[in-house]
Image: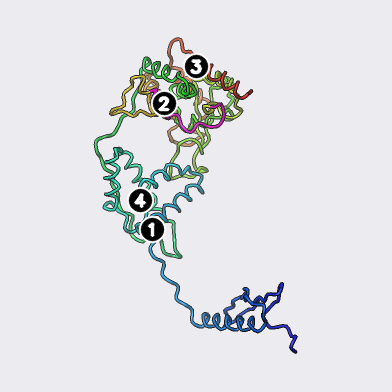
Amino acid sequence: MANKKPDGLILRNGWWYVQKQVRYGDQRVFLREATGSRERAAAEAYRDRRIVEIMEELRNPKPIPIQSERSFQDAAVEYVLSLERRGKNPERAIYAIKSFDPFIGHLPLSHVHQGALGTFEADCRDNGLSSGTVARAYVVVVSVLNHAARVLRDGPEPWLKTAVPRIVAPDWDDRRQPYRLTWNEQDRLIAALEKPRRQHLIAPVLFGLWTGTRQGEITGFRWAWEQRCEGLPRFAVWRIPAEVRKGSACKTVSQQEDRYLVANAAARSIIEVQSGVVDDELVFPGPRGGGEMYRITNNGWRSAWTEAGLPKDGYVAGVHNLRHTFTERLAETGTSMDLIKRVLGHESGGVTARYTGPMIRQMLDAVELVTRENVTVPRAVVTQITTQEKKKAG
């Protein structure tokens, strides 16, 4: 009898382990753990002590502590994850959250309101940020609060039990307007971009000026997006996927639609030159001849804008000016506002209704009206491509 196997104990490599099922009414607990002992008697004592402890816990369970109110930071993390699950780019939301997290991230959700954002607002103004920047941040704040009130739950209870407060952005009368480039100013800007370490920006900037394409669409512009259309020139029609184009923040990628971009003769001449770039995917690769550009409005762009003598005070100095310039030039040709919206990719109606064959031809005819005599591709673009080819070959 002395050698009888002990109940609920197993000997492994000289050490005793507990493997025991503890029952109390309908409740069961599987006890699996090391006793920390080589001696059988000590292991049995450990087993018995743990069974008593577990039985006591089953008889007198501790009340589940009430979940303290979730913080704004907790909800912000969940909001970003929801954007990613829906196929939305969370980059802007993350940027905004990082800016106001030191001020409200630690607060319970019910404590986030207009008054709680006063310090953040004052800090933004002290650091020279515009009221537009604050307004965009507030959009994210409200989105996080709505997500906490309508989606996030602890059991049946929403994370935010109170109504989502109204948060009004400040107006410091500092809104900057987009700047429309004249042809002469465009030439000065391109000349300033011909300097070393800026030349890779010339082709995408010219393409933006001739198509009104957004920065994110240009930096990710791919050869695979070309659509061959019977009766239309090569490189005239491109289909930009929904995950790239700017769309409604309230829609998932599957709910949004692709858009067609039409390229006039000047834009096609830029693409034809870019076809000499040794890159199988990107039409406008990065400065080293490979990989996607992060953005166009980098230090080289800002320096070129200043050297070209273009205004900064009161005006946007970013790449949106390219889109604004193209839009103004297109409007001056007498093109209807509805057709301009279609060319620029503004959401209106279904993709089938907007992009039939006749509509695409009508869009192309409209953008062909934006012309300039003696349109040529600057030599710097060709030089840059030659340099990239040498780097690839080497």
Q: In the image, is residue 207 above or below residue 129? A: above
Eye-nearest disc, 1 or 4: 4
| Alpha carbons under labels 2 and 3: distance apart | 15 Å
On the image, which quarter does residue 343 sit in?
top left
Q: Nearer the viewer, residue 306 or 233?
A: 306
Please tell me how crowded label 1 is: few (under 14), some (14-19), or many (20+) other residues with Cα within 10 Å.
some
User: Which numbered disc, 1 or 4, marks the residue that appears first in the sequence?
Assistant: 1
Per the image, the residue denoted by label 1 is: 71
Tell me the chief SS of the magenta region.
loop
Mark number, residue 301: 2
Q: Is residue 52 in sight in this rendering?
A: yes
- Kind of residue indicated by mark 4: Pro
Q: Position of residue 386 (x, y in %)?
A: 57, 18
Q: Does 128 sit left or right of 156 as displayed?
A: left
- Kind of residue indicated by mark 2: Trp
Q: Which image quarter is the N terminus in?
A: bottom right
Q: In the image, is residue 341 above or below residue 34? A: above
Q: Which image quarter is the C terminus in?
A: top right
| Alpha carbons under labels 1 and 4: distance apart | 12 Å
Q: Residue, x 64% and y 77% (percent of image)?
A: 37
Per the image, the residue denoted by label 4 is: 102
* Magenta-drawn segment: 288-304
